Image (tube, rainbow, N blue to C red):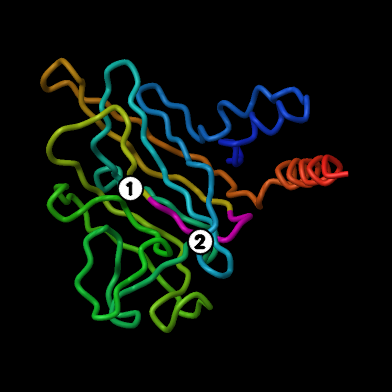
Amino acid sequence: MKTVRPSSFLPAALVVLGLALPIAVAEANVIFVGTHFDIEASSPVDVGITPLRAITLTAVGKNGALPNTFDSTFSGVGGTGITTSSNRLHQVWEFYGGLQTPTLTLAGDPTPVPQELDTHFLIRSNEYLLVDALAEDITLGSPELDTRDGFGSYLRGSFSLKGDLEQRWDFAYLVVKAGTEVFLDFEIGGVDAVIPGKGYANSVGGSFVVPEPSTLLLLILGVLGLLRRSGRR
C-alpha cells in the first residue's frame, strides 16, 4: 500500500530551506505497478466547503501498451471497482438524488450539477462502448449543496474507449474526505500501439490513502513566513 502525497511544489521550497529532497517524492503518486499498466493518483486538491479532496486516477501504458478498458466485473467473474469501506465517495446526483451521475455526460438537471464535487468516470456518452452498466451509490446528506448530494461506497462498471488512444488515460475522478482509504479491485485492459489485434490486461488491486494537507508543507510555509518577516527588519 502506498500513500499519495502532495508533491508538485515541494522541491522548490525544500531548496529554499536547504533541505534534501526525499527520493520517494518523485514516485509518490504511483499507487499500482503492473506488467503492462501502472495506476497513478494525482496530488489531491481541496474542493467544496468541508473541505473535500479531489484526485484523478490515470492508467499509464508500458512498453507499447495503450490503455482503453476499465472492467470492474472481470468479464462477469467478480470485482468491486473503486470502493471505500464505508460511505466516503462524495456524490452529486441529478434531480434531487434521483439520477446517478457516473460519467461526464449529465441528463440536464435545471440546477446544474457541480462536477468538481462529484465522483465519476472521466468519459462522455459518445466516447465509450458499454459492457456492464456504470453504477454508483449514494446516501443523501452532505453539507456541500442541497438534497442532491451525499456519500457512497462504490464506482463500478465495464467499458472500452472508442477512437484514438494514448499512453496516459485519465479514467476516474474521485472526491473524498482527507484520510479516506480507497480500495482498487478492477482490470485495466488495452491494445498494442503497433501490432493490430494484440491485447493486454492487468488486474489492479490494493488501496491507497488520500492524505491530510501536508504537515511538511505547513512547516515550510511557516518558515518562509518567518524569513519574509525577518527580512523587513
Q: Position of residue 222 (x, y in %)?
A: 79, 47
Q: Which residues are magenta?
A: 173-180
Q: Nearer the viewer, residue 209 or 126?
A: 126
Q: Secondary structure at mark 1?
A: loop
Query: How far is disc 1 from disc 2 in space, using C-alphas?
Result: 27 Å
Residue at x-position 25% and y-position 29% = 166
Q: Secondary structure at mark 2?
A: strand
Q: Which of the 4 quarters of the picture holds residue 217?
A: top right
Name the residue: 45% across, 67% down: 152
- What is the three-letter code of the residue carrying label 1? Ser
Please name the residue that numbered disc 2 is placed on. Answer: 47
- How many marks on residues? 2
Instruction: In the rendered structure, find residue 72 and report the number of the disc placed on it.
Output: 1
The quarter of the image holding the N terminus is: top right
| Residue 156 inside the magenta-drawn segment | no
Residue in front for this viewpoint, 220 or 24: 220
